Image: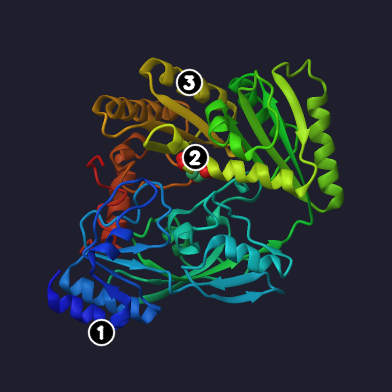
Amino acid sequence: MKKNILKKIRAIVGDAHLTTAREDLMCYSYDSTGMEYMPTAVAFPGSAVEISSIMELANKELFPVIPRGAGTGMTGGSLPIQGGLVLVMSRLNRILEVDVENQVAVVEPGVITGQFQAAVKKEALFYPPDPASRDFCTMGGNVAECSGGPSAVKYGVTRDYVLGLEVVLPDGRLMHTGVRTAKGVVGYDLTRLFIGSEGTLGIITKIVVRLLALPTHKKTYLVLTDSLRQAAMLVSEILKRGILPNTLEYMDQTALHVVREYLSLELPQSTRALLLVEVDGDENSTEEQGKKFLGMLADRRTYPGILEVRQAHNEKEVDDLWKARRSISPATYKLRPHKISEDVVVPKTKIPQLVDFTEKLSRELGIIILTFGHAGDGNIHVNIMVDKDNQEEYQKGQTAKRLLFEHVMSLSGTLSGEHGIGITKAPYLSLELDETSLALMQSIKSVFDPNNILNPGKIFSTKSH
Ligand code: 2HG
Ligand code: ZN
């Protein structure tokens, strides 16, 4: 990037908000994939108007711009793979409005999701999307990736809560999409087009979300089983009985092992999997759902693989369980220095087939593959643990990834439920999308960004990273 361009960016954001110092650039060169790409410069814009001026300049001078939230992404969406200017949204971190009566809020993209949830909770309101990283990740990043989380089984994902957006287009134009009403069908649904577009179509500068009334009660349970298959089979059984938990998560034996220190409970020797189940609502409905759930599991002859069913009795027990669940992802690095992290989804009834397959893959290839995650919506995290410096192991990991994707397709599943495509899944896109859809998606990208300057090389690249 030429010196005079940097000078112009500096003039837009102010001297204190642009850096080219190597030690600063390094902080914005990686995300949760563990991959690193150095940006040429990093800017911290303070308003949509500044972002608009930067994009106008980028479109004229043709340099890449990569929007970035907190860098917790799992597929490389915020990595500057071609260098260029990283735009960090941390200064746009205000909750602009919480309209309690209409159950709507307006936030800037840099607001931390967990902090937003805590803020609306004070008004007895509820914003359900809860990525495991909610204490660090941002609302803008969640919209860009259409993040989900444990509560998606009952409450849905980010897409289900965003009513409208303010967006800066790659050429610098500022636009508004959607509504702030409960319904709206005027024109094409551009809001949904931006949600999950991984920062390739525009830069989100404001988000209008709908909120729910805060559930007043909850009950948290865990079910221990002597086989992974039994835990997997229980998932669709529970939902079939009309129980709709706000959490239906599972951990396999290896996932349990890496977070063992957070769990202040004794596990029977033969434990092979754990289901974390939570029901919520008002007092009556929570009570009723809890009873139904325990009633269903009471007859052990129907489910011989169940070792124990426990209820968390106090806040500490509930917190411990959640701490364990939210810590699995980072704790896996105890096993190997790198991971290939996938978030495939299969129809719920096919989870047993999927976990049988990953267990077999792990045995046959001789590498660690653990599974855990959002079983209630069939969204399984398959973590293939490798050491990238060990070529043979790394190649085995890549083989496992391809075989996994092919298997998921054969089960009528999808490659990604919440982490997006980014660069890590880009070479596999054609396993799922037909040529016509792929071509149409690429034309949409060129309509929005004819010069391919906004987050280039994401979603559609065929190069392996
Ligand atoms: C989770 O649910 C995250 O914990 C991360 O989506 C999953 O590390 C992973 O693969
Ligand atoms: Zn997840």
Q: Is residue 357 left or right of residue 11?
A: right
Q: State the separation of the CA atoms marked 3 and 1.
A: 56 Å
Q: Nearer the viewer, mark 3 or mark 2?
A: 2
Residue type, label 1: Ala
Assign the N terminus to one quadrant of the image.
Answer: bottom left
Residue nearer the viewer, 407 or 441: 407
What SS does tag 2 mark?
A: helix
Res 117 seen here: yes
The answer to whether the residue bearing label 1 lies less than 8 angstroms from the nearest atom of ligand 1 is no
Residue nearer the viewer, 221 or 23: 23
What SS does tag 3 mark?
A: helix
Reading the image, the residue beneath label 3 is: 359
Please tell me whether residue 449 is drawn above or below residue 436 in the rendered image: below
Q: State the separation of the CA atoms marked 2 and 1.
A: 43 Å
Residue located 28% across and 48% down the image: 460
Q: Quarter of the image holding residue 196?
A: bottom left
Reading the image, the residue beneath label 1 is: 11
Q: Quarter of the image holding residue 153?
A: top right
Please tell me whether residue 134 is drawn above or below residue 115 in the rendered image: above
Assign the C terminus to one quadrant of the image.
Answer: top left
Reading the image, the residue beneath label 2 is: 331
Q: Earlier in the sequence, mark 3 or mark 2?
A: 2
Query: How crowded is the residue under tag 3: few (<14 C-alpha within 10 Å), some, or many (20+)?
Result: some
Residue type, label 2: Ala
Please state the horizontal and vertical placement of residue 18, each as a whole percent of the image: 28, 75
Q: Earlier in the sequence, mark 2 or mark 1?
A: 1
Res 188 seen here: no
Please state the horizontal and vertical placement of residue 464, each as a whole percent of the image: 24, 39
Residue type, label 3: Glu
Residue located 39% across and 33% down the image: 336
